[in-house]
Every structure is written in structure tokens, then in C-alpha cells.
Amino acid sequence: MRDVRRIGLLLAVLWIAGIWGDDAVMGAGQTEQKLTKHISKAVECNYLLSLPAGYGEKDQRWPLLMFLHGAGERGDNLELVKVHGPAKRIEQGKDYPFIVVSPQCPAGQWWTEKTDTLLALLDEIESKYAVDPERVYLTGLSMGGFGTWTLACRHPERFAAIAPICGGGEWYLADRLRNVPVWAFHGAKDSVVPLDLSEKMVQAVQRAGGTAKLTVYPEANHDSWTVTYDNPELYEWLLSHRARRPTPTPASGQRPMKLNKQVAVEIDYLLHLPEGYGDGLQKWPLMLFLHGAGERGSDLDKVKVHGPPKLVAQGKSLPFIIASPQCPTGRSWSDPAQIQVLIALLDDLVEKYQVDESRVYLTGLSMGGYGTWALASSRAERFAAIVPICGGGQPRMARQLRDVPIWVFHGAKDNVVPLAQSEQMVEAVKAAGGNVQFTVYPEAQHDSWTATYDNPKLYEWLLSHRKGPERK
């Protein structure tokens, strides 16, 4: 661990016109930290498993098809999973030349939040059954279509091909699918999930140099899955693709199964303790800052190039405990696995330092703006206020944020993350009855964070909010 903290005399600071002035004194600096922790949360999943005719009769490896159901089939009754898709066809007597695994998402949760669980399930199936790791396929409908895009974007190396149906995803991650064949399906008259969500993802994959095609059913509404899963060409297309992966006797039919697995987390981060910290029993506000995509890696100096860590490194004094974690290369803050890491980090900081849990704040820029929306949507009860900058999120999750004060920032001329990404979230929070304000810089492009973090009013606004006991 390299300590870059500057030690000096304790100085009294008079805060008169804002958080700092030109004569602001130096803070306590930033130290490099590492969190390595086994989280107690168990990854648990109920699922249906179908083994094809002939499985176990000879030394043969079989293709694996993972099917993700829609929102209406969530719960703890696996019979619900059998109402659509491959699970329905198997129940009707159809024999697929795949091992078919059909997990069930718990009530009130979403596949886009469960990628760590799904990945653990894949590991479990591949370790226990005769799976050909070069022929692992992923498909899903509606909520499962969103889950298909999300899981494949997070772990493209696991799949030989994917077939998302009437879903959508994070277009800015679509470049990860340039080596994964995609066949998407949607109804032109879908009144639940707009067609343009599939169109944007397919176009983003194509722009990245990937192989993606979209079949649109002109007269179909939301149900574009029945005709798709009834079409033998889908399965022929899947089996025509192989991924290049190294290869790591139950009865046929579907059987209910359960997965239970623990996970570990690790993350490097910068920690800033404010002037006066440790002088007494005072509790301090905590700010969690999430950097952008360009600062990912294993060098914490990169985290200091923008935002609060940059200001602290320049000698600004901020009256917060500031934790600035670093996202690993190739990952995103909005990854469900990274959300779990950030929650574990918050827990660790609250346990070890004098944190005022009623004043925990979250902010981030670009990829960190997306992460701010995602983490706050997942754990709204943890934050007194949030500040997402030039990011975006999932409008359907906005209702989770109706009790969290939000100040959003974006550049009107942003050519990296369209302004519409913030606009959609702001409108969704407002529609849910939330407290949100929105600042658009008319001439700013992607860098809308420098002006934001240089503005003392931002920190005054944060400190004006305190989480009430009803949200603990």
C-alpha cells in the first residue's frame, strides 16, 4: 500500500461563502486502500433442467441453451416458467438437441440485476453435466430479452450466439458483442417494450463490427416469442455457431433444481479523510464517487484525473469522507457484480470509519453516472442524495428513487452519452413523484463534470439533505 497522505498541522477552517474559497487549506489527502471481503449474501436460484434424448448413453458433450422468462413468470413456483418458450415446448413433449436450463427470477427482481446468479448457474451446469463449452446459447423474452442483452454484454466470452426477444439493453456496451452472433426479434406493434429498443441494440452491435440481425413481425404486439420459439430455423441458426472456448447420467425431461453459492469481492479505492477527522466522536458525511470508463484498471492514480479525487489531490478540502473506488478493466459500474462490490465497500466504510449514515451521498460521471443511477436504484435506502453526471439508467426502476433527492447534470452537445439518456431518467423520476432537478450546460459536450464538481453549490446542496429514519 502506498501512502500519499500529506500530514500537516490541524487548521481551523471557516466556511463562509460556499464549501471552499481561494484560500482553502489542504485536506487530509488520499490514501490507497484495498477491500477484499467475502460477502454473506448467497447466490440462490431455482431452475428447470431438461436433458436431451440420448444424454449419458455415450461419451458426448451437448450444447446448452439458457432460457430467461418474462416478468409475469417471476416467483417461487417453477410451473410458471413452463408457460412460454422452450420450457413450454418441452412440457408439451418437444425434444430439443440441447441441455436446456430455465431459471426462475424471484418476485420483484429483474434478470438485469441477476447476472452474477446466472453466471454462477452456468458454472454449475457446466461443471456437473456434459456441456460443450463451445456451444452455449442464451435467449429470453421481454424481461428475459433485457436479461439476455445484459448477461451477454457482461460476459460475451461465455456464449456462441444469443437470441433476445422483445428486449433492450445498454447500447454503450454493445461493442462487447462484436464476436457474438445475435438474432433479435420484436413485434412492430409492441405496446409494452418499444421496437426501437431492439433496433438500437442491433445497430450498436453492427456499428461495432458485429454480426447482428433483427426480425420484425409487422402485425405482432408484445408476444413476438411464440412464433419465434416455434420456428425450427432459430435452433438451426443457434447450432450453426460455435465459440472458441477450452473444454473444461440423469433421466431426460425437466427437473426442479436449486443453486446455492457464495461469492467474494475485491476492489482498490482512494480514501480521503477530512480535516479534523478523529479529533473526537463526530460522525462525518460520506461521499462515494464513481469514475468514468477511461479510468478503469489497476492504477489508482488514474482515478485522480477527474472529480472529487482530482480536487483533493490539488489540495482542496472537502468536509466529507470520500471513497473513490476503481472499476476493473472491461467491467462497468452498472454490472450487478460491481453493484455488489460497491455495497460491500459501503458496508466496510460504515463499519471502520466515523460515518454519519444519514448523510451518505453518491455521485459519478459518464460510466460512473450510469453506475450512480444503477446503484441508487438498487439500494435507494442507503443514500441521502445522489448526483449522476452525463449518465443514464433504466426508467422502469425510477420509482425506486422517488424518495431520494437527485440533481442531474448533462451537456447539451454531448456526443458520447446523448442528453436523452439523462432526460429519460429525469422524466421517469418525476412521473414517479420524485424530487429531481436537472442542469443542462448549453455549450458543453461530454465533459459536464468539471464545471459541476468545481461548483461549491453542489456540495452545499448535498449537505442540505439528510436521510430520514423512515429510509434506514
Image: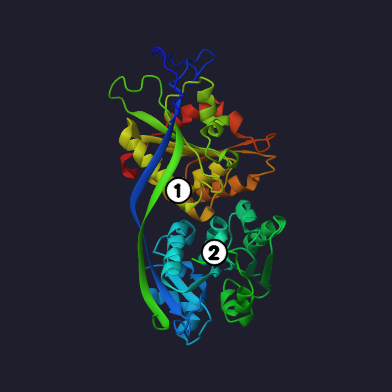
Which amino acid does the dot numbered 2 rest on?
Pro
Q: Which residue is mark 2?
A: 246
Q: Position of residue 258 (x, y in %)?
A: 35, 69
Which amino acid does the dot numbered 1 rest on?
Ile
Residue 442 occupies quadrant: top right
In this view of the protein, which residue sits in the foreground, 311 or 261?
Answer: 261
Residue 145 occupies quadrant: bottom right
In this view of the protein, which residue sits in the foreground, 1 or 83?
Answer: 1
Marks 1 and 2, how far apart at CA: 29 Å
Label 1 neighbour load within 10 Å: few <14, some 14-19, many 20+: many
203 lies above or below 76: above
**Which residue sits furthest left?**
281
In this view of the protein, which residue sits in the foreground, 79 or 312?
Answer: 312
Could you tell whether 312 is left or right of 417 in the image? left
Nearer mark to the viewer, of 1 and 2 = 2
Could you tell whether 43 is left or right of 186 in the image? left
Q: Position of residue 305 (x, y in %)?
A: 58, 30
Mark 2: secondary structure: loop
Circle nearer the N terminus (1, 2): 2
The residue at the point 31 percent across, 19 percent down is: 279
Res. 244 mark: none
Res. 339 mark: 1
Label 2 neighbour load within 10 Å: few <14, some 14-19, many 20+: few
The residue at the point 39 percent across, 40 percent down is: 35
**Which residue sits furthest bottom?**
93
8 lies above or below 308: above
The residue at the point 51 percent across, 34 percent down is: 300
In this view of the protein, which residue sits in the foreground, 96 or 449?
Answer: 96
Mark 1: secondary structure: helix
